[in-house]
Image (cartoon, rainbow, N blue to C red):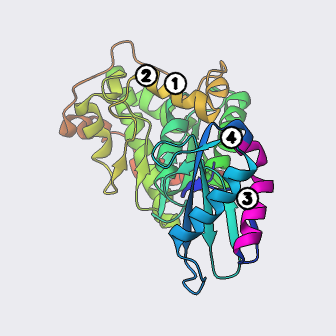
Amino acid sequence: KVFGIATMSRAAGCEKDAAKIAELAISYLKDDMEAAKSFKVEGKRSDKSFPMTSIELSQYVGGELAEAYPECRVDVHEPELVVHVEIRDLAAYVHAAPTPGAGGMPVGSNGIGVTLLSGGIDSPVSTYMIAKRGVRLIPVHFFSFPYTSEQAKQKVIELAEILTAYCGKMTIEIVPFTHIQEEIRAKCPEDYFTLIMRRFMMRIASRIAEANGAKAIVTGENLGQVASQTMEAMASTQAVIDLPVLQPLIGMDKEEIVQTARKIGTFETSILPYEDCCTVFTPKHPKTKPKVHEVAEIESVLDIDALVDEAVAGIERVKVG
């Protein structure tokens, strides 16, 4: 589960002597040799002072293995088993086929990002996918108590705990969002509610990013999946910030997202029936093709800076991992 590792090899080592290397290969790879019908040996020398060439080493160890396991034939073109022999600076190593690693890039190698983490299926998957590209992530959750329950908050913490297996230790920023949602409901047209709410999310996420040296915001948006994820709607929500918004799920089918959620272990937690803030005050007929200037004009009745300041000041931080 550690990103940045392409493959792993479980190897055994010995001193750099051809006879001892062959002896080690015969004993260490017993199960592999007995299970395979054919094999070949690939030798590699990083220590060029070793007296045999890589080809000579492969031939020698291969001959010893063929004699020890006559039921496993030599096949240099399409072997069932490849035996690896490596001569390194301090020792010689023998191993069979490498095990695939998690791939990707080491977490942190591509900087820091803020990821919006709801309790749904999509955002944990988008968090996982961007972490795989080497980004260390700060999860942000918008909490609307009492409209959403403590169980909903705990659900998000559990999702973050699962993700730490891939992302490493994280600190969740839990943003009090109730007052903002109540102000939007009281002062703005219903069909613009979700758009304005998401613009506030972006502003707050941007503030958190600035405070932590993060260079991007990550969302689980998926083009056309819901009313707030049309191109026009996303343009409207992103217009209030300068940071790039990374959307790794943007072109995926829902089933692809679900399959990934199952693979990484977040699906069963994501489907627990505890609603998040996005389900609070959901409009019956949400605006799907808003114009940016219209949304800005409609939300101008709100004291935006004061509401953002209040939310940021009330952030609860929970460490996971």
Label 1 neighbour load within 10 Å: few <14, some 14-19, many 20+: some
Distance from disc 4 to disc 3, alpha carbons, whole Å, reads 39 Å
Crowd tier of the residue under label 3, counting other residues whose Cα lies within 10 Å: few below 14, some 14–19, many 20 or above: many
Q: Is residue 190 above or below residue 174?
A: above
> Residue at position x 26%, y 35% from top?
295
Reading the image, the residue beneath label 2 is 254
State the image quarter where residue 31 is shown: top right
Foreground of the two, 268 or 39: 39
The crowd level at tag 4 (other Cα within 10 Å; few <14, some 14-19, many 20+) is some
**Left or right relative to 13: residue 271:** left
Q: Nearer the viewer, residue 233 or 299?
A: 233
Q: Look at 62% across and 74% down and name the residue there.
A: 87
Residue at point 45% right, 46% down? 77
For marks 1 and 3, the one nearer the N-term is: 3
Which residue, given by chain and number where applicable, does mark 1 sit on? Answer: 258
- Foreground mark, 1 or 3, reads 3
Identify which amino acid the numbered label 2 is placed on: Lys
Mark 2 in CB contact with mark 3 (< 8 angstroms): no
Residue type indicated by callout 3: Ala
Could you classify mark 2 by the number of other residues whose Cα lies within 10 Å: few (under 14), some (14-19), or many (20 or more)? some
* Image position of 14 with respect to 254: above or below: below
Whole-number angstrom distance, CA of label 1 to CA of label 2: 6 Å
Residue drawn at the location 66% of the way across and 24% of the way down = 268
- CA gap, disc 1 and disc 3: 43 Å
Confirm whether residue 45 shows in the render: yes
Q: Earlier in the sequence, mark 2 or mark 3?
A: 3
CB-based contact (under 8 Å), mark 4 and mark 1: no
- Numbered marks: total: 4
Mark 4 = which residue? 162
Q: CA distance from mark 2 to mark 3?
A: 47 Å
Question: What kind of residue is marked 4?
Answer: Ile
Q: Position of residue 71 (x, y in %)?
A: 69, 38
